Amino acid sequence: MNWLTGPAAFVVIWWIVIFAVLPIGVKPADDEMGSRAGAPASPQIGKKAVITTVIATFLWGILYLVSSSDIWSFRS
């Protein structure tokens, strides 16, 4: 994995994980004037971004170890 494909793989993994983490713990807001139906009461985006970064770093590490070792070759 070179200096371009490593960060690109991390970005792809991060986006896949954020879409998996976003719906966790979402509760709809109360019916109040000015709020959209389906809008979350407390989205906790910062907390979910940190969780996503930790999970994506772990998954990227596994991808890096597999691609840099001779267990599975991507260059055949």
Image (cartoon, grey):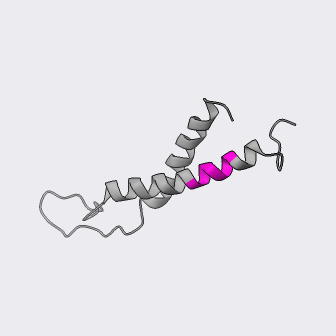
Q: Residue furthest right?
A: 76
Residue drawn at the location 57% of the way across and 55% of the way down: 58
Residue nearest the viewer, comparing 5 with 35 = 5
Residue drawn at the location 61% of the way across and 30% of the way down: 3
Percent x, y for residue 36? 23, 58
Residue drawn at the location 52% of the way across and 57% of the way down: 55
Task: Judge whether 75 appears above or below 16 on screen.
Answer: above
Q: Does the rendering let one see residue 18?
A: no
User: Where is residue 64, by image quadrant?
Assistant: top right
Percent x, y for residue 11? 53, 41
Magenta part of the chain: 58-64
Name the quarter where the C terminus is drawn: top right
Residue nearest the viewer, comparing 25 with 56 = 56
Q: Is residue 63 left or right of residue 32?
A: right
In the rendered image, residue 27 lying in the magenta stretch gets the answer: no
Task: Judge whether 37 appears above or below 1 on screen.
Answer: below
Q: Is residue 24 left or right of residue 8?
A: left
Residue nearest the viewer, comparing 2 with 75 = 2
Secondary structure mainly formed by the magenta segment: helix
Q: Is residue 5 left or right of residue 37?
A: right
Q: Does the rendering let one see residue 70?
A: yes
Percent x, y for residue 1? 69, 36
